[in-house]
Image (tube, grey):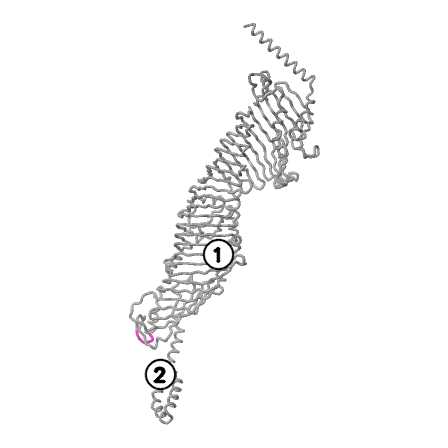
């Protein structure tokens, strides 16, 4: 045993002497500067780079064997050496070998260090990068490069049978890049990016198994080339950190990064505050041969700061998995789960084609029931609404498809509080196209409009992305004219029930079309208070001011129910209203529309009554007074009529009619009048005549049937309807005076004719029969 121990000590001593002798020989008789020409030549042959080694090559022997190179630059073949900025440069590079494996006949790289690396990447106006030629040449010469760089007696693994030369163990204990910088310039887009303070660390780097790796850098971006020279602040500054366990399948060109963790803290020049983002993933795989990228169990967390997102930072998280095929230009996002504050939950999946050139997508979208009110408050866009619970229960689900210009929800189911809509909705992302076909059960539009007594300034939804242009209108305007002038519109809406402006509509069917500055109401029908509504119209936004045209039609609508729905007071009129007409106007405010309204309306009311006024009672009482008697009949408080009709001509907001007619049992009432829509003042002058019919209001002297009884109505639509109409006594006195004069003239004529009858008979004998008749007719004419 003691002898064996002595032999081992002697062997160790001999190895130590040999190692010391080798170090003395190498440092004394071998100059590492002699390797420079060979290194420059190998690099030129294999890559085309022109290498300049300005610093010394140095050996290191303790604690490990290694070689170092200082201050090196490399230029691309098309570059002018020494005149152009070098493509690649570094301050120092060092490679060291582990000593113990050398004793076992293996080459094990103990460490690789690269300090002060500078890499300049540039894409020209045609889109070709300056690195592409280098990569193509390296791919062509990869096998030759391996033969040149590998030792003459080294193999890539253990030597079979233990024979042969040294075995290269591809297991690098430590890889480190310090203080690196990468610049990227795109001459086509004018953008410039730079990675500063680049650091990369890895340990136990091995192509056959996973190893930990970590990199950090600062990303700086400019929108214009040369901004840095002008000392302009960068548009983007981002601190980036990436770590995980990497697997390098060099032979298959398949790379994996497990337990991925990417963190960024970014700052934008035009935005205050920091934007924080963290991306984690179970496994990120890249197949460089088939050009496929895959991320499993991805999870993104972000906190965003922007004035458009509210005063406080907006947090959200997104869980997903991703598959990308760059050769086919396709991508799939699966198991999407977006969540944020206030219970927001959005899920679905997305498929993308034409990924690099013209992306188009389709998939499925689901929004869990949530309240939109806190989100609108965050965006300072919650409008004043009559119902405080409006927008508190919103959900949707739909397939979706689209591209960079438009989005379509092709099978939409939307729950909006108490309403449910189904159908299709498509919109242009620039706000210039809207196409929809929707069916809904009910919609209380009044709940989403401002309360009637609201005087405060109402926030607008214009702050929300996608609809800002639709609200770019001055306060008080009826429609967003600038947006509608550029909108291509094709829409259909069907509703079982609609509440608007206090009125109820049933079985609503609406169709809209528009383009080139003209929006058309091509179809509108609705049930309306036991009757029907229909209309067509045109909105011409090319003209200034904008012009409106409407052709309405009303059939047998209950007027009393409409009046009661519009206000708390009882209706002044009851009946079945039918009307049709053609209306035009111009302007974009309600006062302008009323002031410039022109057109024609023909209206008729059947089976109606004027409430709280009985025209029959007034007329019959007046007749009884004239005849010296009193009426003892019990009168109904209202004026019931069979029909009322009129034709209205509208000029500059004033309705005029000269053919007003009201048919009351036993009474005919006709007249003329006007209504000013701006002031809401009106005046009506009518004349009532008693008619001897079976259902006459009262029995009168036949001579009074010809006497018109004048009625005058005037006032304001906002006034008390009970004070609108009255018996026109002055006009009536004038009519009675004319009637009395006519009656006295008739009676005087009869008396004269009786007294002259005998004389006329005598004259007939003397003058002849014809002469007497002519004289009688002439005298009668004097008293008629």
Q: In the image, 688: left or right of 148?
A: left
Mark 1 Cα within 10 Å, few/some/many (few <14, many 20+)?
many
* Residue behind mark 1: 520
The magenta-colored residue range is 625-629
**Residue 523, above or below 22:** below
Q: Secondary structure at mark 1?
A: strand
Quarter of the figure that contains the N terminus: top right
The disc label shown at residue 165, or none: none
Indicate whether residue 180 is drawn in magenta: no
Q: Residue at x 30, y 74 (%)?
A: 629
Viewer-nearest of discs 2 and 1: 1
**Residue 71, above or below 679:** above
Instruction: Determine the main secondary structure of the stretch shown in magenta.
Output: loop
**Residue 595, above or below 45:** below
Q: Nearer the viewer, residue 113 or 635?
A: 113
Q: In the image, 549: left or right of 565?
A: right
- The residue most toward the right is 83
**Residue 218, above or below 430:** above
Q: Nearer the viewer, residue 319 or 334?
A: 334
* Residue behind mark 2: 747
Instruction: Give percent across and percent down for residue 125.
Output: 63, 41
């Amino acid at each position: 045993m003691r002898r064996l121990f002595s032999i081992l000590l002697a062997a160790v001593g001999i190895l130590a002497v040999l190692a010391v002798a080798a170090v003395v020989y190498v440092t004394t008789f071998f100059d590492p500067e002699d390797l420079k020409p060979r290194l420059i030549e190998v690099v030129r042959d294999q890559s085309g780079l022109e290498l300049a080694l300005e610093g010394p090559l140095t050996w290191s022997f303790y604690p490990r064997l290694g070689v170092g190179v200082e201050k090196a630059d490399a230029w691309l073949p098309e570059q002018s050496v020494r005149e152009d900025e070098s493509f690649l440069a570094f301050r120092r590079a060092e490679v060291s070998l582990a000593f113990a494996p050398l004793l076992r006949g293996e080459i094990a790289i103990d460490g690789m260090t690269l300090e002060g690396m500078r890499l300049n990447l540039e894409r020209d106006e045609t889109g070709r990068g300056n690195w592409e030629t280098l990569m193509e040449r390296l791919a062509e010469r990869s096998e030759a490069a391996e033969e040149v760089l590998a030792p003459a007696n080294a193999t890539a693994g253990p030597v079979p049978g233990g024979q042969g030369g040294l075995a290269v163990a591809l297991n690098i204990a430590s890889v480190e890049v310090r203080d690196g910088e990468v610049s990227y310039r795109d001459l086509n887009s004018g953008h410039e990016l730079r990675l500063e303070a680049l650091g990369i660390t890895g340990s136990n780097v091995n192509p056959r198994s996973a190893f930990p790796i970590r990199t950090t850098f600062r990303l700086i971006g400019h929108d214009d080339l040369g901004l840095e020279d002008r000392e302009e602040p960068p548009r983007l500054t981002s601190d980036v950190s990436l770590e995980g366990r990497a697997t390098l399948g060099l032979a298959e060109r398949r790379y994996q990064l497990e337990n991925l963790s990417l963190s960024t803290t970014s700052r934008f020049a035009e935005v205050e505050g920091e934007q924080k983002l963290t991306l984690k993933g179970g496994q990120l795989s890249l197949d460089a041969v088939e050009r496929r990228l895959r991320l499993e169990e991805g999870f993104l967390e972000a906190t965003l700061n922007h004035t458009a997102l509210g005063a406080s930072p907006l947090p959200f998280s997104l869980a997903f998995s991703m598959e990308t095929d760059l050769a086919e230009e396709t991508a799939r996002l699966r198991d999407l789960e977006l969540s944020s504050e206030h219970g927001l939950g959005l899920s679905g999946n997305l498929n993308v084609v034409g990924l690099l050139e013209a992306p188009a997508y389709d998939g499925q979208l689901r929004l869990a029931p949530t309240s939109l009110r806190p989100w609108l408050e965050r965006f300072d866009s919650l409008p004043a609404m009559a119902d405080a619970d409006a927008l508190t229960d919103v959900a949707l689900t739909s397939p979706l498809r689209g591209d960079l210009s438009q989005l379509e929800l092709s099978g939409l189911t939307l729950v909006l509080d108490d309403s449910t809509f189904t159908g299709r909705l498509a919109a242009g992302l620039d706000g210039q196209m809207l196409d929809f076909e929707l069916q809904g059960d009910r919609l209380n539009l009044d709940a989403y409009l401002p309360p009637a007594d609201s005087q405060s300034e109402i926030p607008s939804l214009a702050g929300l992305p996608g609809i800002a242009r639709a609200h770019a209108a001055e306060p008080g305007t009826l429609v967003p004219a600038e947006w509608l002038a550029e909108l291509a519109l094709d829409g259909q809406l069907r509703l079982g029930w609609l509440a608007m402006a206090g009125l109820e509509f049933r079985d609503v069917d609406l169709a809209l079309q528009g383009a080139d500055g003209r929006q058309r109401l091509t179809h509108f029908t609705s049930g309306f208070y036991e009757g029907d509504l229909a209309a067509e119209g045109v909105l011409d936004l090319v003209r200034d001011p904008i012009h409106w045209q409407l052709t309405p039609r009303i059939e047998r609508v209950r007027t009393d129910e409409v009046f009661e729905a519009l206000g708390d007071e009882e209706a002044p009129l009851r009946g079945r209203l039918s009307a049709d007409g053609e209306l035009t106007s111009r302007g974009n405010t309600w006062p302008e529309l009323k002031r410039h309204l022109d057109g024609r309306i023909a209206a008729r009311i059947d089976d109606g009554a004027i409430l709280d006024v009985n025209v029959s009672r007034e007329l019959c009482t007046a007749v009884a007074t004239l005849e010296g008697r009193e009426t003892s009949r019990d009168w109904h408080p209202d004026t019931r009529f069979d029909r009322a009709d009129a034709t209205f001509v509208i000029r500059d907001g004033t309705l005029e009619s000269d053919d007003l007619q009201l048919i009351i049992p036993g009474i005919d009432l006709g007249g003329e009048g006007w209504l000013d829509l701006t002031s809401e003042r009106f005046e009506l002058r009518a004349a009532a005549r008693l008619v001897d019919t079976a259902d006459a209001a009262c029995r009168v002297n036949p001579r009074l049937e010809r006497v018109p009884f004048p009625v005058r109505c005037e006032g304001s639509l906002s006034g008390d309807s009970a004070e609108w109409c009255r018996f026109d006594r002055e006009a009536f006195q004038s009519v009675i005076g004319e009637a009395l004069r006519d009656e006295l003239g008739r009676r005087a004529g009869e008396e004269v004719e009786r007294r002259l009858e005998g004389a006329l008979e005598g004259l007939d004998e003397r003058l002849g029969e014809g002469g007497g008749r002519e004289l009688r007719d002439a005298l009668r004419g004097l008293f008629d």
